[in-house]
Image (cartoon, rainbow, N blue to C red):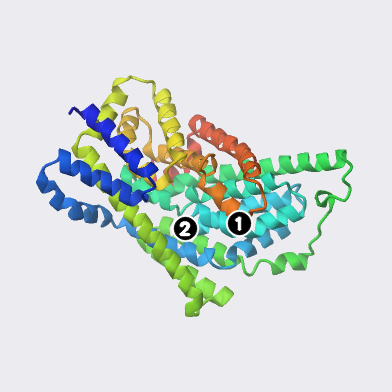
């Protein structure tokens, strides 16, 4: 069989086992092992354990369980609810201030926890009922939280960015910094939409004569109430600032920074919320162990999958075929991003990165694209997959914490945010400095 036939068979087998419902890690490992048996020397089977171990022994990957520990410590506490309450108290005078507060709370919490589903759950469990109680439509409230949760994949520390840095062999520090500008841009876009949508819903309430609508009621917070909301939030903002300073100030490596963040998060949760007993720490540690094990298994099997793909010349052949089409660089980028969007309907970002990196990165590098910049673009596009029907993960997280909101309303509520993400991608293409200026300023061009 030629490379084309083997590649098509490899892709078909992968899709077959994934749609069969086999967990992703075992599906990729199974396909890789079967193709090693039939298409590679028998001695290669003896190297499976060695290949997986060597790929997973990267010091960069050590940051994953440590950042997950930090996120679990914050996510299992009341930090999300306290953060949301404080922002609402300070932003209540802004039109749609409650929605804006939820967007900002999602952004800050995502930066601390680094997980999109955790952000949706932590902020949404408090924010959605409050928005519904104040007259926000179900789709609007669900869309804000689902879209705000996606910021966890973009704002540092992002576990998905760590995996991209490993797969693309790029600087993790540069990649983290490159995500800040686009992350803030998306926060502004989401907050701006929240203001516009709130005004529209308020105008509809007035036009329909619903004078008793909660949308028309004014809220008031005294200065004392505003200031009293800060003490429980400031420690976590200081934690986020401290982690960033340690990393970019040259005081610690990414792995050391992750360890520092994990320990400080546990200390803060113990001090602020009194969560220091074993029954309180147990859920945090169990969650960290479960998620870390799942991710590391996916990483290990994906790297074995990529190794087999490379040995059989599938990835090189696919890359050469893409280059041989002589597409203009922007058509090439559009085609690749469209493929990532489609894959996002079915696969999580971790798998998309590890499965596609060997194929898409060489043509992009040959076309002259900055892989740090492309990494940020790819993060935004994969965020779209998290909220894009039919199987956006955050949609189902929202449905779980707000079962009274029909799934149809949730889907229609997130679609404007999908359009805003597409706008963000276009702005990054026209103004790449949004992503590249900050890492260039810190590290040099």
Horizontally, residue 278 falls left or right of residue 120, namely: left
Q: Residues within 10 Å of mark 1 (few under 14, many from 20)?
A: some
157 and 159: which is toward the camera: 159
The numbered dot on residue 194 is: none
Horizontally, residue 427 falls left or right of residue 177, namely: right
Q: Residue at x 24, y 44 (%)?
A: 32
Tell me the quadrant of the picture where the C terminus can be found. top left
Q: Residues within 10 Å of mark 2 (few under 14, many from 20)?
A: many
Q: Quadrant of residue 105?
A: bottom right
Earlier in the chain: of badge 2 and badge 1, it is 2
Mark 1 highlights which residue? 401
**Residue 249: x, y in percent?**
42, 58
- Give the Cα separation between the discs numbered 2 and 1: 31 Å
Horizontally, residue 44 falls left or right of residue 432, namely: left
79 and 169: which is toward the camera: 79
Horizontally, residue 293 falls left or right of residue 158, namely: left
**Residue 352: x, y in percent?**
39, 42
**Residue 50: x, y in percent?**
18, 55
């Amino acid at each position: 069989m030629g490379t084309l036939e083997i590649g098509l068979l490899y892709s078909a087998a992968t899709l077959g086992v994934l749609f069969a419902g086999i967990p992703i890690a075992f599906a990729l490992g199974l396909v890789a092992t079967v193709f090693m048996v039939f298409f590679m020397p028998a001695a290669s089977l003896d190297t499976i354990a060695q290949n997986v171990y060597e790929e997973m022994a990267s010091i960069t990957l050590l940051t994953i369980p440590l950042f997950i520990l930090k996120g679990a410590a914050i996510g299992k506490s009341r930090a999300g609810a306290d953060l949301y309450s404080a922002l609402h108290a300070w932003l209540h005078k802004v039109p749609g201030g409650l929605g804006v507060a939820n967007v900002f709370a999602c952004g800050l919490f995502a930066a601390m926890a680094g997980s999109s589903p955790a952000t949706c759950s932590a902020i949404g469990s408090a924010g959605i009922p409050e928005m519904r109680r104040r007259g926000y439509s179900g789709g609007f409230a669900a869309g804000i939280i689902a879209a705000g949760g996606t910021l966890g994949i973009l704002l540092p520390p992002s576990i998905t960015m760590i995996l991209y840095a490993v797969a693309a062999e790029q600087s993790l520090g540069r990649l983290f910094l490159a995500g800040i500008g686009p992350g803030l841009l998306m926060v502004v876009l989401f907050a701006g939409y929240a203001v516009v949508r709130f005004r529209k819903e308020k105008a509809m309430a007035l036009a329909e004569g619903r004078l008793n609508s909660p949308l028309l009621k004014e809220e008031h917070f005294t200065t004392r109430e505003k200031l009293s909301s800060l003490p429980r939030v400031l420690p976590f903002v200081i934690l986020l600032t401290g982690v960033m300073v340690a990393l970019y100030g040259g005081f610690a490596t990414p792995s050391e920074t992750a360890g520092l963040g994990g320990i400080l998060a546990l200390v803060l949760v113990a001090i602020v919320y009194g969560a220091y007993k074993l029954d309180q720490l147990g859920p945090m540690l169990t969650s960290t162990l479960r998620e870390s094990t799942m991710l590391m298994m996916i990483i290990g099997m994906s790297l074995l999958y990529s190794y087999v793909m490379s040995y059989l010349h599938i990835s090189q052949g696919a890359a050469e075929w893409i280059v041989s089409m002589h597409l203009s660089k922007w058509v090439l980028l559009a085609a690749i991003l469209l493929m990532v969007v489609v894959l996002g309907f079915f696969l999580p970002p971790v798998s998309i990165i590890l499965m596609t990196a060997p194929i898409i990165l060489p043509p992009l590098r040959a076309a002259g694209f900055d892989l740090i910049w492309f990494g940020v673009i790819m993060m935004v596009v994969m965020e779209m997959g998290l909220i894009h029907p039919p199987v956006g993960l955050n949609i189902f997280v929202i449905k779980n914490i707000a079962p009274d909101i029909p799934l149809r309303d949730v889907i229609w509520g997130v679609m404007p945010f999908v359009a805003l993400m597409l706008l963000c991608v276009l702005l990054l293409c026209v103004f790449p400095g949004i992503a590249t200026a900050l890492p260039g300023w810190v590290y040099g061009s």
